[in-house]
Image (cartoon, rainbow, N blue to C red):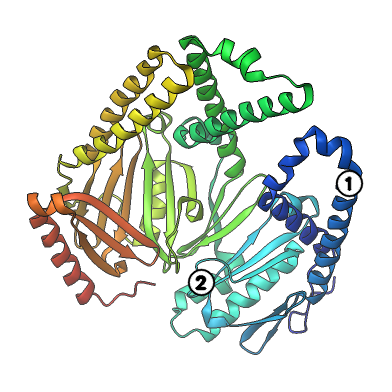
Amino acid sequence: MTKTDFYTPQRQNLRGIIVIFLMDLVKRIRQNIYALLPLLSSNIRNNYLHFVIIGFIVLLLLQLLYSYKSYLNFKFHIEGKRFFLRSGVFKFTDTDIPFDRIQNININQNLIQQMLNVVGFEIETAGQGSAEIKIKALKRQDAVALKQILLKNKTEESPEVTSEEGSAESTREKSSEVIFKLEIGRLFKVGLSANYLKGFGLVFVFIMTLIQYIEDIFSNLYDVDVGDEYINQVNTGFGFFIALFVLIILASFLVTVVSTIVRYFELKITRLNKDFEVEYGLFKRINQVIKKSKTQVFELETNPVKDIFGIKSVFISQASSEELNDKKKIGLVGLSADEVEILFQSLFDLKYEQKFVTSKSSMRLILRLISAYVLICIALGLGLFFWIGNFSVLALPTLLMGILIFVAYKKVQKSHIGVNENLIKINSGSINTNSKFIATHKIQSLALKRNVFQQRNQHADLIIYTASGSERINYLKLEEALKIINYLNFKVESSHLSWI
């Protein structure tokens, strides 16, 4: 089989036309979903349906033509020590990336790409919060070959890359070792022990929206006032609300388990010397590299259910030009304690078990948390009362308030920072327990924030900035916070290690 010559201008795989068309079409639908809602009107369907169909056909043809031109104009190649890309439809954009600016290369595969047997290729560069180059359709073997060429050239041309790191890239095939593969049984345990609050919020909004749409549809199609005929007859009692609440809980449980399984399906971690390659996903296959030099925060998450199952989750934050959210962190779930130890030692050159000098958040923090929770419960109680019109529904916000007070207490109890010669450990959480580890030489800056009340009672919030974002420890005693800042500033200034 003839190998692709990346030193001459290349287009994407021919299937890229379909990939670009379908991905852009999905994007357009998501962006304009609310523009489709008027189609629910019986007046529009009865009088203008043929115009709507013609309009859709015209838009689809225009989108297909746009995708075809995008495919034709998208060309890339390697020249000298640089990667070149030209793209655009009506306006051309030329991108020129020196090899020494390449930070990472990801090979991903969403559902559309899986169906067409192609992969996406992303190049992350220094100073970019997201991938600067995104190629949507390559054969997997071409993507792997291009990745090896770019990383090999980067290693040869970049003076800051050590010989050990160069060996990891140039001898990847020989030195790679699969150290973890997530089995379906353990993946199911990860889903059972996941955070259900996110799923609860998603399902709650979905059900409330669905009820509203059902009412609108029935009103438009059958001239029936669902609110008067059905809903108002059902929800007059507290039992209706309890049943709805139980439905949402069960649905959020199912949504969270399924979404976790879909996201982390066939998670595999491969060691590449001291770096790691991570691959996971059912409908969208993600391929990422955890580079020791880029790692900023090592976050360990556990909870009582995870402890029973004997599993832990690790989330890696790497250097980026923008604050990372949870979705952009690299998630490694379902790990055992021994596997966590392997990762920790490889990334920090230290044992996981460390001794720290700790400073805890003041119990005054609980007042800040409870005041916010009280406002939430009052708003919820008033909303339920005006919706259902029965004082019995106030029992739910009262119960919720008790739960939130307990959560606030656990948050304050777990909130602390530990410091030693090499590491910072930041603890947080309520039901979950999160421990974030940061090497002291990775710190970029430190800050103290004090509101009016903290200025009076001699407390402060400590903020630690790294190349992946910021970490905050609330309500430390001012004297302890200043000691931590002075010590960490000394460690940063006296260290000869690079933050990336």
The x, y position of residue 50, in whole percent, is 91, 44
- The total number of labels drawn is 2
- Amino acid found under the numbered disc labelled 2: Gln
Residue 201, placed above or below residue 230: below
**Going 59% across and 44% down the picture, which residue do you hit?**
263
Q: Which mark is residue 53?
A: 1
Counting from the top left corner in percent of width and height, residue 449 is at 21, 59
Residue beneath the point at 84% across and 67% down: 68
Residue 183 in sight in this render? no
Q: Give the labeled residue for mark 2.
A: 128
Look at 40% across and 52% down and name the residue there.
342
Graded by Cα atoms within 10 Å as few (under 14), some (14 to 19) or many (20 or more), the crowding at tag 1 reads few
* Secondary structure found at label 2: loop
The location of residue 119, given as percent across then percent down, is 72, 60
Mark 1–mark 2 distance (CA, rounded to whole Å): 42 Å
Q: Earlier in the sequence, mark 1 or mark 2?
A: 1
Mark 2: few/some/many CA within 10 Å (<14, 14-19, 20+): some
Q: Nearer the viewer, residue 272 or 91?
A: 91
- The quadrant holding residue 1 is bottom right
